[in-house]
Amino acid sequence: MHRVDFILALITGEATAWLFYGLFKNLAGQIPLFGLIPAVLFPILAVLGLWFSYYLGKRFLIVFQAAKFFLTGVLATLVYLGILNFLMWASQINKGIFFSVFAGLSFIVGTTAKYWGNKIWAFEKRETVGMGREFGKFFLVTIVGFSLNVGIASFIVNVIPHSVLVSQVIWANIGAILAAIISSAWNFLGYKFIVFRS
């Protein structure tokens, strides 16, 4: 494991902890003192997880790449959820066609940031030759991921009824999280075998 992997895992873990803290505070309203534990725990877990995957990756390279993709994806997903929640908070709209627009805009921002993290860190593709073609492939894979993400999130939020025990904002986040998981699986496979293949 290179020093840059260690540093990026720490940064990703810490940034994720603070984005998680802000998101949880927005959803729950108040954070008890133990709510700050992720600021210490997440970076440690990120480094340990990456270290473990590094040793597994010596035998199966895809494991180490998947771990770095996962760390980048978690951060991008929290950026996605942060933007989505900001748009819902600013507009006081959390369902209908505007929710779908908000989910789409949030997905585009998160995916754009994730492109560079995946290119440089997860798949270690630093060359600039053929970037136009590579970006074209990235764009096509991302469009499929975008369609999956927005379609699944919109279906869950606008079609599947939620329990009276769950608020509409929580249900919107559940839809967004499930959609992010499915579209992330597609994105990893597409980036690994189509966009950044060696």
Image (cartoon, rainbow, N blue to C red):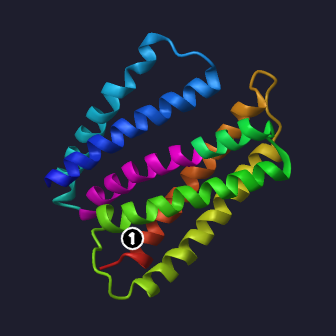
Q: Is residue 166 left or right of residue 187?
A: right
Q: Position of residue 112 (x, y in %)?
A: 51, 63
In which image quadrant can residue 170 be found? top right
Examine the rendered structure and indicate whether residue 140 appears above or below residue 45: below
Q: Is residue 71 left or right of residue 77?
A: left
Q: Position of residue 194 (x, y in %)?
A: 44, 78
In which image quadrant can residue 166 be found? top right
Examine the rendered structure and indicate whether residue 29 appears above or below residue 5: above
Q: Residues within 10 Å of mark 1 (few under 14, many from 20)?
A: many
In this rendered view, identify the residue nearer to me: 7 or 187.
Answer: 7
Residue 6 can be seen in this image: yes
- Determine the main secondary structure of the stretch shown in magenta: helix
Magenta run includes residue 64: yes
Magenta run includes residue 142: no
In which image quadrant can residue 13 be found? top left
Q: Amino acid at mark 1?
A: Lys
**Judging from the image, what secondary structure is the residue with disc 1 in?**
helix
Q: Can you name the residue that lies furthest to the top here? A: 33
Examine the rendered structure and indicate whether residue 145 appears above or below residue 30: below
* Residue stretch in magenta: 61-81
User: What residue do we see at 56% from left, 69% from top?
Assistant: 142
Examine the rendered structure and indicate whether residue 188 appears above or below residue 166: below
Q: Position of residue 63 (x, y in %)?
A: 29, 57
Determine which residue is flagged by label 1. Answer: 192
User: What residue do we see at 49% from left, 75% from top?
Assistant: 138
User: What residue do we see at 58% from left, 51% from top?
Assistant: 180
